Amino acid sequence: MLQSHCETEYKDVEEIPIHFGITGKPDCSGGRILIWLLPVTMVLTAGIMLALAPQIGRDQPEYMWFPGAMALYVAVISLAVTRRMIEVAMGRARTIGWRTFAIILVPIVAVVIYGLRQSAQQ
């Protein structure tokens, strides 16, 4: 069902931007099939992270939340970036946009700050 939707909705799209430079403009593109790259990667990564959760919880129960949080983070990023890739490919947008950059960078900065605080307390 999803594939038939994509084939009818995006039939005019021949190339999908697959990489955006620091300015947010696409600097590499590939065939339409590559639109599946991020969603498939997201599912695999989320599966691996969730499979690791019991091991992490057994060794360090205070970090059992981490694999689920990472799986959610990867899902949100891939959905945001895939959506933007489609918008750029269809001509609705020219760049990845500041919101997508924020979705990617804000959690990374938060984890770095959290890690620095934790190491300062020890």
Image: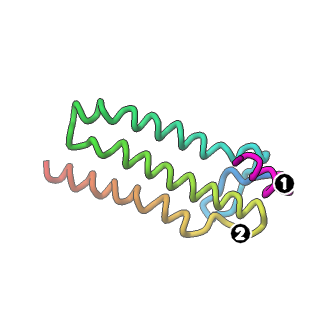
Q: CA distance from mark 2 to mark 1?
A: 18 Å
- Camera-side residue of 100 and 109: 100
Q: Quadrant of residue 113?
A: bottom left
Residue at 14% in and 52% down? 121
View extreme (front): residue: 1
- Does the magenta segment cover residue 66? no
What residue is pinned by disc 1?
11
Q: Could you say whether the residue bearing mark 2 is in a helix, strand or loop? A: loop
Residue at point 37%, 45% (across, down): 68
Which of the 4 quarters of the picture holds residue 97?
bottom right
Side of 45 relative to 19 (left or right): left
Which label number is shown at residue 93?
2
Q: Looking at the rendered structure, which numbered label has been put on residue 85?
A: none
Q: Amino acid at mark 1?
A: Lys
The span picked out in magenta is: 1-14
Q: Toward the viewer: 105 or 61?
A: 61
| Upstream in sequence: badge 2 or badge 1 | 1
Rendered image quadrant of residue 63: top left
Q: How many marks?
A: 2
Circles 2 and 1 in contact, beta carbons < 8 Å = no
Q: Residue at x 57, y 55 (%)?
A: 79
The residue lying furthest to the left in this view is 122
Query: Where's residue 70, x and y in %?
Result: 40, 47
